[in-house]
């Protein structure tokens, strides 16, 4: 709530956009790693990182940044391993956001 200065509607919009976009971004990153498209890995991971930073989700954003850098460096095997860690961070974040929505946003 701090990031959106208490604006519940803005928070709802950010969460809605995030829930809509992050599965597509993850799928795209995975496909880009599998097809060894470094520029796509970098761009998609950067987009995901930005969305996560908008939600003040620093641990997950850091994990996305790591994938972004590995993509930039064409380190596909390491990027695949880091993507697994990113997915775990996103699962934790997802569960926390769902719980937050249930308890604090009427």
Image: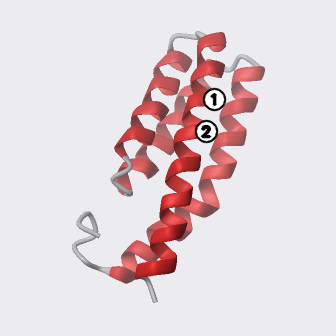
Image label count: 2
Q: Residues within 10 Å of mark 1 (few under 14, many from 20)?
A: some
User: Could you say which disc has been placed on residue 7 in the image?
Assistant: none
Residue at left offset 58%, top offset 23%: 39
Q: Please indicate, yes or no, whether residue 52 appears anywhere in the rendered image.
A: yes
Q: Position of residue 98 (x, y in %)?
A: 54, 67
Please, which residue is most extreme toward the bottom here?
106
Picture layout, residue 9 above or below residue 25 = below
Picture layout, residue 102 above or below residue 1 = below
Residue indicated by mark 2: 87
Picture layout, residue 71 above or below residue 104 = above
Q: Which quadrant does the N terminus fall into?
A: bottom left
Picture layout, residue 51 above or below residue 74 = below
Quadrant of res 79: top right
Residue at left offset 39%, top offset 82%: 9
* Separation of residues labelled 1 and 2 (CA atoms): 5 Å
Residue indicated by mark 1: 84
Quadrant of res 100: bottom left
Left or right, residue 7 beside residue 62? left
Asked whether 53 or 86 is in front, the reply is 86
Q: Position of residue 95 (x, y in %)?
A: 55, 59
| SS assignment at label 1 | helix
């Amino acid at each position: 709530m701090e990031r959106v200065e208490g604006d519940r509607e803005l928070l709802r919009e950010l969460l809605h956009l995030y829930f809509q976009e992050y599965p597509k971004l993850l799928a795209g990153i995975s496909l880009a790693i599998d097809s060894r498209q470094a520029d796509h890995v970098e761009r998609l991971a950067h987009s995901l990182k930005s969305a996560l930073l908008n939600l003040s989700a620093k641990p997950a954003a850091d994990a996305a940044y790591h994938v972004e850098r590995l993509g930039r460096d064409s380190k596909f095997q390491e990027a695949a391993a880091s993507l697994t860690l990113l997915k775990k961070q996103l699962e934790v974040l997802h569960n926390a956001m769902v719980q937050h929505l249930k308890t604090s946003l009427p």
